[in-house]
Image (cartoon, coloured by chain):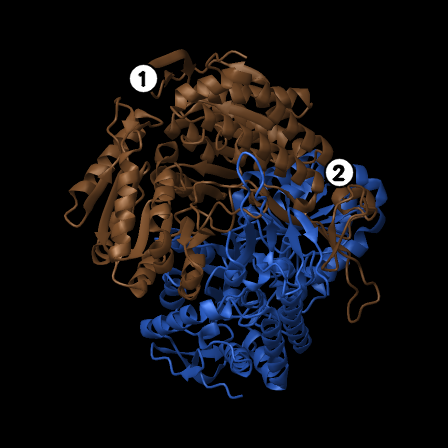
Chain colours: A blue, B brown
Amino acid sequence: MNIAGNLLIGHSMVRGNQGTSYAIDAATGEQMEPAFGGASQQHLDATCALAWQAFDIYRETSLEPRAQFLERIASNILDLGDELIERCVRESGLPRARIEGERARTVGQLRMFADVVRDGDFVGARIDPPQPDRKPLPRVDLRLRHIALGPVAVFGASNFPLAFSVAGGDTASALAAGCPVIVKAHSAHPGTSELVGMAVQQAVKDCGMPEGTFSLLFGSGREIGQGLVRDARIKAVGFTGSRGAGTELIAIAAERPEPIPVYAEMSSINPVLLFPHAMQSRGDAIARAFVQSLTLGAGQFCTNPGLVLAVDGPALDGFIRAAAAALGDVQAATMLTPGIHMTFERAVATFAGHPDVVTEARGAAPTSQSQGQGALFSTTDVAFREHEALKEEIFGSSSLVVRCRDLQSMLELVESLEGQLTSALHIDEEDHEAVRRFLPALERRTGRILVNGFGTGVEVGHAMVHGGPYPATADGRSTSVGSLAIQRFLRPVSYQDLPESLLPEALKTSNPLAINRRIDGKISLAQR
Amino acid sequence: MNIAGNLLIGHSMVRGNQGTSYAIDAATGEQMEPAFGGASQQHLDATCALAWQAFDIYRETSLEPRAQFLERIASNILDLGDELIERCVRESGLPRARIEGERARTVGQLRMFADVVRDGDFVGARIDPPQPDRKPLPRVDLRLRHIALGPVAVFGASNFPLAFSVAGGDTASALAAGCPVIVKAHSAHPGTSELVGMAVQQAVKDCGMPEGTFSLLFGSGREIGQGLVRDARIKAVGFTGSRGAGTELIAIAAERPEPIPVYAEMSSINPVLLFPHAMQSRGDAIARAFVQSLTLGAGQFCTNPGLVLAVDGPALDGFIRAAAAALGDVQAATMLTPGIHMTFERAVATFAGHPDVVTEARGAAPTSQSQGQGALFSTTDVAFREHEALKEEIFGSSSLVVRCRDLQSMLELVESLEGQLTSALHIDEEDHEAVRRFLPALERRTGRILVNGFGTGVEVGHAMVHGGPYPATADGRSTSVGSLAIQRFLRPVSYQDLPESLLPEALKTSNPLAINRRIDGKISLAQR
């Protein structure tokens, strides 16, 4: 495949005519060929029209062909080979091993959703058989299934050029649910986007899916991104990015004649709670693991540990010393874009200049302009409580340790936090009693609670929640990672007294799809 | 129990001090004793504080005690006996048999949710066992359950003084999910509300649930209703009512620092589609059944058939004649409130005066000022397409027949409709081919599709969807009736590498709750 800078509209490759833009080599700052043409309003309209035409056909594709389509996307992505990896490394500035791992995750996640589709449990089929002799009124024949919401607009994320972008989690779960997808590419990795887009486009053709099942647009966030969210044919939005951009999209979606759900993953500082016994017995080891998590991928993870809470004292001093020493050894790392790097440096400078904040350590000095230098700060519980600015996310390798007077103060600080993607507890068995008091507060504001680890590893599985109350995500009732994510793009429809021949396959009495169903409220396992 | 006009705040009965209001006998217009005192901001605050205190305890009540609590509410409501029925009949103007039926439904729905709680499937427990030897990285131990969102504000509905009010569907499903509930009573039936509220309050005491599990407030919609939605301790809203009031609540919820979901059921005209063969073979019988559904409960159902679409011609003329004759025989019926009656008369007068609308029939003349007189109108597909006002809901016994040029025009009209709670198809076997073309359009905009019936009967079961895309409801991804409604008030939380002793019961390896769980993605049925 050749990167040509084209929009992918259904089966076509189309030259955008609204300005041109280029990828930037993250490490060198050099402009990369080719030029990408931005989509016009006409392109946007044509794309939505194709998605809308595809919707009724694609959402009724049977489970096996839909699963094979997802698998084909995965294998087409692998077939891109080294061209994808190399381009992605240059555009993102992330190390090759990380990008290879991210590709494996992307492919694995598409294959997981293929299994989810085959399994059919996501249909949530339910049958309440009729009771013609019931008194005082006979009971009707009632059957329920979940159907796809409609075409979904997916916004590529800067920090996961593969796993949260063109064929990432949102795209995979929406396609699995039966929704056509229109991706608005992130300007940080257009070449990667086009390559992956062509792999998906080819899979649509390979598998005979309707043309509008997938499209990829480049262009301005304000014109094309917001335009997608405004378009009446778009019925849901998947977004990972900044709180500012996310809340703008949420407002636009709410103002539509027909408001639609926006699944925006926005902001999280991912508190790390160090409990006294664990800190006492192995503070140094925790500190080293913490710095590893903090600096992974130049800290550009939504699950990056941006806040550490612990009871003040010699053990915490020791933790900070060990963390500072470890951080001092960490090389500065290329950040995703010049803009992200600049925002990081500014935020770090603001923290450093804050009268109540102590700069405990910085990472090794940068060797180029594109690199972010790690930062570790500390403050007191009193200051943290007073200054809302200290609770804001810094995107990059920066974390703030809060010295708490005691566990009660630490708990109060937890209660002052907004919604979070993750909360990490470092505990020994002697800490369990104390932890019990924290769990309710953590559950109320966290998508994933983890023990003796850090949130930066996000397992793609069935029990994963990558979500959490606002503003971690716009809608804490769902997850963006893992098989449960398919539920974001579904809604229930009930069918009353339909003749067998008009019922959808999932609800026919003979169960031709061989899926598990709930009969009169009880799970009935499929005979397979 | 005595109706005293009190607020029910936790365990207490409190005299409201923000103005007084009275119930109105719907049939006679007379003011009924006693006076109800409105809640103040202090009452609101105290109520939310109690609910918040109760939340962490109530949400972790085990399944059996929570189920028994719901059953106790049901039996306490039955114990209210005739006092409840008589008060409710007077306040609503609805016939005794209907109110008795609605009580049965309310009690039945509480018991159904008790079974749903016992069953435990709503927890959605999932376990992905660890794989310590996995390469390149070991897999962590990941477990997921759903927890309650938090205290829920429920708004009583005028048209279902029992089933959609103080202990109605929203309250039952929220309590089942583990959410404390604060009900804002509807001013149309305050005595009914207080009686039912006392039954719930007593059940909280009987079952030793935390005090703030339930409260009931009277007062102004703007002050108390909107104040509840603004309060940071409220985490979701259940509402059934007008589109105007619903959209106001949605806007308030969206503007909060932490936006919350509003489940508002608002507006639906519930299209009835008459297909040619059915209309030809049994148009008269359908017309009679249609008028029965139209005039049931003075037409004051959210599922009332407000729109009939059919191909113009002699068969449709015959249908209209038969419906007109049937409607002429229907006695005018007391409407819920003078305000609802006035709005109905105005809307009917507007339709009657519309240049493109023909008044085909009116019901029998009213014998009192409180009664609404049925109305049947007709218009053409061209006029219906042109005038958005003809697509608006008239709350009461009024329906509009649209004469369509052909089936294609009828399908185009369907595609022009907003989201609907129900769509009813009247079909013979010879119509099936034609129906197939309509189903996708209906699925995209309807919560429940039914054949050869009308939507006014809403079965409380497992396969019921009482919902649908906007504006039928604010959130078409859920239902307000049936067991699936519990999902509105839940969110997933994931637990990574938690020691057994810190895991919630639902996720302990030994499965002490004996619930079905998903292990590595596959349903594992409980050993019971």
**Local crowd size for mark 2, using a 10 Å CA cut-off: few (<14), some (14–19), many (≥20):** few
Q: Which mark is residue B28?
A: 1
- Report whether residue A265 is seen: no
- Element under disc 2: helix
Q: Disc 1 or disc 2, which is closer to the eye?
A: 1
| Horizontal and vertical percent position of residue A113 | 63, 67
Residue A26 appears in the figure: yes
- Provide residue B230's location: percent of width, then percent of height: 45, 35
Count the numbered circles shown: 2
Q: Is residue A293 left or right of residue A336?
A: right
Q: Nearer the viewer, residue A105 or B77?
A: B77
Q: Is residue A433 above or below residue B410?
A: above
Residue B107 sits in quarter: top right
Q: Is residue B459 left or right of residue A361?
A: left
Going by the numbered disc 2, the residue's amino acid type is Arg
Q: Report the residue marked by disc 2.
A: A436
Q: Amino acid at mark 1?
A: Thr
In the rendering, at what x and y percent does residue A244 appear?
45, 55
Residue under the image location 63 percent in, 30 percent down: B70
The image quadrant of residue A117 is bottom right
Q: Position of residue A203 (x, y in %)?
A: 55, 80
